[in-house]
Image (spheres, rainbow, N blue to C red):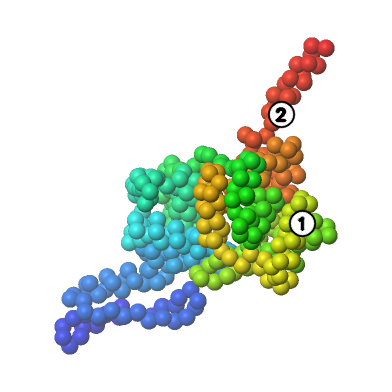
């Protein structure tokens, strides 16, 4: 124990430890009134430094970060970090990992479900479920790798829902009204045309370069994604391996993009739309106000594209291939939009039985 009394009568505690990079670090604190206080500080600080489950939740988060950050896409970790900082640490930060009980989780859940945003609205069920899953993942990590006896989330009911209550989308007529309202800005018009008629994610759109467009074959190649991270423009791999794909474009869109690029030359390897998602949100709001069309999220244009394809009679397999999804995902998420196939089968069987 490295506790000593100073000439002025106060006590000092210090110790050495190795951090998770293997570097030797020194911690010291002075000014304790008693030897017992200095010794207790050393004991608790050592636990925190070691990442023990006897440490505070906040200290364990540093261990969790070192373990998980290298395994995740940069934007994925940033989203997790915001959630941990804003929604988990205020409640659990100073609590010891091995002393957090199920009742603490329940009280935290109740607090979040009662919270309201600046517009007086509660958090969405899907966001609540995402937060809940993040807390569960942290405790599972502690159980699996650091000897925590149990996950306090395991005995609680998950808050929120993993399925959005409403899926917003535009009909073709609604989109055409919106598109007509933003034709005064050709770059905005072309960007939304690609989103609606090709079903791209906004990050995929903002990463496009002229090299990705094959005008002769009328296809666009999706092989990267754009993110704005901490003030930096970052090009990453697409969301999933299946997201790497080639999307066929309708002929009119090929003509629109060709005309626009001829009037606004872009280097072959530069971004065609060198702006951010914030600019897209601004243009979405502007176009909705001008056209009178209901405001939806930019990502809902992807839902709108799926709705259009389903209405045109395309299969879940073909739609999934176009969007970079598994066909089971399309079937599950958009089942309510597909025709009543079970009803068609029953009616056909009824006809067979009556013949």
In the rendered view, tell whether residue 348 sits above or below residue 190.
Answer: above
Q: Horizontal placement of 100 versus 210: left or right? A: left
Dot 1: few (<14), some (14–19), or many (≥20) neighbours within 10 Å? few
Q: CA distance from mark 2 to mark 1?
A: 37 Å
In the rendered view, tell whether residue 172 sits above or below residue 258.
Answer: above
Identify the disc placed on residue 43. none
- Residue 81 locus on image (x, y percent): 46, 62
In the rendered view, tell whether residue 33 sits above or below residue 109.
Answer: below
Residue named by callout 2 = 341
Q: Is residue 202 shown to the viewer in this render?
A: no
- Residue 124 locus on image (x, y percent): 45, 45
Q: Nearer the viewer, residue 145 or 211?
A: 211
Extreme front residue here?
184
Residue named by callout 1 = 255
Which of pointers 2 and 1 indicates the residue nearer the eye? 1
- Residue 238 locus on image (x, y percent): 66, 60
Residue in view at x 61 percent, y 67 percent: 274
Q: Earlier in the sequence, mark 2 or mark 1?
A: 1
Dot 2: few (<14), some (14–19), or many (≥20) neighbours within 10 Å? few
- Residue 204 locus on image (x, y percent): 65, 59
Q: Quadrant of residue 175?
A: top right
């Amino acid at each position: 124990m490295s506790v000593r009394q100073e000439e002025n009568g106060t006590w000092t505690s210090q110790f050495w430890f190795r951090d998770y990079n293997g570097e030797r670090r020194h911690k010291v604190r002075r000014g304790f009134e008693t030897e017992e206080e200095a010794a207790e500080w050393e004991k608790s600080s050592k636990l925190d430094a070691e990442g023990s489950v006897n440490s505070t939740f906040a200290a364990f988060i540093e261990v969790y970060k070192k373990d998980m950050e290298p395994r995740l896409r940069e934007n994925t970790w940033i989203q997790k970090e915001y959630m941990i900082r804003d929604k988990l640490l205020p409640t659990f930060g100073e609590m010891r990992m091995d002393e957090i009980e199920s009742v603490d989780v329940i009280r935290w859940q109740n607090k979040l479900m009662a919270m309201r945003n600046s517009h007086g609205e509660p958090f969405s069920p899907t966001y609540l479920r995402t937060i809940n899953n993040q807390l569960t993942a942290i405790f599972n990590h502690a159980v699996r790798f650091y000897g925590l006896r149990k996950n306090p989330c395991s005995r609680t009911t998950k808050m929120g829902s993993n399925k959005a209550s409403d899926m917003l989308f535009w009909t073709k007529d609604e989109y055409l009204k919106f598109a007509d309202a933003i034709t005064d800005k050709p770059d905005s018009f072309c960007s939304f045309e690609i989103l609606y008629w090709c079903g791209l994610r906004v990050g995929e759109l903002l990463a496009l370069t002229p090299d990705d467009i094959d005008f002769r074959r009328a296809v666009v190649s999706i092989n990267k994604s754009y993110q704005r991270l901490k003030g930096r423009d970052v090009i990453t791999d697409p969301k999933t391996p299946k997201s790497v794909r080639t999307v066929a474009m309708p002929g009119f869109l090929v003509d629109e993009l060709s005309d626009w690029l001829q009037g606004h030359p872009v280097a072959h390897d530069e971004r065609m739309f060198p702006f951010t998602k914030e600019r897209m949100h601004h243009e979405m709001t502007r176009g909705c106000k001008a056209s009178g069309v209901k405001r939806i999220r930019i990502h809902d244009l992807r839902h709108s594209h799926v709705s259009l394809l389903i209405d045109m009679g395309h299969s879940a397999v073909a739609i999934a291939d176009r969007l970079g999804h598994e066909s089971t995902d399309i079937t599950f998420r958009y089942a309510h939009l597909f025709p009543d196939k079970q009803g068609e089968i029953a009616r056909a069987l009824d006809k067979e039985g009556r013949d």
